[in-house]
Amino acid sequence: MANVVNSTDDYRFWRDQKLAKIAPNIEACLVEVNNPKCLSAAEKSQIITLCREQNFALFQTPNQMDYESSMIGFNQQLGLKNFDQHLYAKNQGLAHITQTEQKDQAEFIPYTDRAIGWHTDGYYNAPENQIRAFSLFCVNPAQSGGENQWIDHQLVYLLLREQDPEIAKALTHPKAMSIPQHVVDGAIRRATSTGPIFFIDETSKQLSMRYTQRKKHIEFYNSIEIKQAVDTLDQLLANNTSARFSYTMKANQGLVCNNILHKRSAFTDDNAKNPRLMLRGRYFNHVH
């Protein structure tokens, strides 16, 4: 991808290509996978094409004997091997996203039944640990709720730039958003992370995004232009645009994506023995 942020000509060409390939509906983005451990050439091609054009693909599999090994094998076939072994991640970087009674883990919203606002995964990571892709697989859905919503972050940039180029430009400021360091018992678990909201990833050459709608423990650069741009971004995300998808995954359904913006609604579990369980993997490379 050329530098769509700095070059008007490159942006216009990219914009026209992007708009021409928008999926008409969510059904067009769902791939039936016969065996996640051994993708057919057609299945793999369809998933990679969707991720290249839409930055995500939904998929559905039969029941699996071992969900963890199936998802690890599935992800690896899509080039997702360089995983983020973050806090609470387990086998090969997979995290079990489910309610927990462990006090420390329950401080992180994904491990509760609460709603999660718009964000990209790993928005607090240092640039050298940028999350470029993640997968999410439903082993067991909630009794009610737990709807996922997502929107291609590149389309968000496009819509903002079409509305006002200065808004998009403000969100590329190198100090647009900072996440203060995470300190536990006097020890620094994560250093302060400062950077733009939209940027061209030097590794992949793709237009990328790091963002969270959380306002607690988040600092935006002290300028009127950036604060107004963030407000405009939040307004866009609040609107029900055709670029936004909503879907409540059933058992054996999953999402693989190039770290698109996403959110989750609150949910209610059936009981403690049958909780909502999603397997999530975070990766330092794109789907390819």
Image (cartoon, helix red, strand yellow):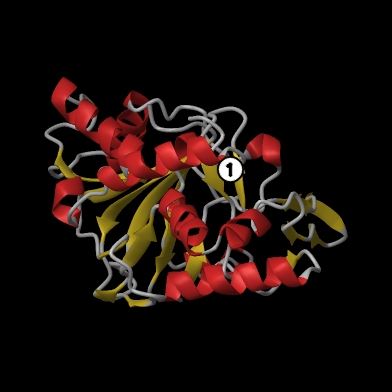
The residue sitting at 38% across, 58% down in the picture is: 151
Quadrant where the C terminus is found in the figure? top left
How many numbered circles does the render carry? 1
Of all residues shown, which one is farthest toward the top?
Answer: 41
Q: Nearer the viewer, residue 124 or 110?
A: 124
Please state if 58 lies on the left or on the right of 188 as rendered: left
66 shown above or below 136: above
Q: Nearer the viewer, residue 186 or 33?
A: 33
| SS at mark 1 in the image | loop
Q: Position of residue 34 (x, y in %)?
A: 11, 34
Examine the image and state in which quarter residue 148 appears: bottom left
Please state if 128 lies on the left or on the right of 238 as rendered: right
Examine the image and state in which quarter residue 108 appears: bottom right
Examine the image and state in which quarter residue 203 appears: top right
The residue sitting at 17% across, 30% down in the picture is: 43
The residue sitting at 32% across, 44% down in the picture is: 54
44 shown above or below 145: above
From the image, tell me which residue sits under label 1.
5
Q: Position of residue 275 (x, y in %)?
A: 32, 67
Q: Position of residue 49 (x, y in %)?
A: 27, 32
Q: Position of residue 86 (x, y in %)?
A: 60, 45
Going by the numbered disc 1, the residue's amino acid type is Val
Of all residues shown, which one is farthest toward the front?
Answer: 9
The residue sitting at 53% across, 72% down in the picture is: 234
**Can residue 55 be spotted in the picture?**
no
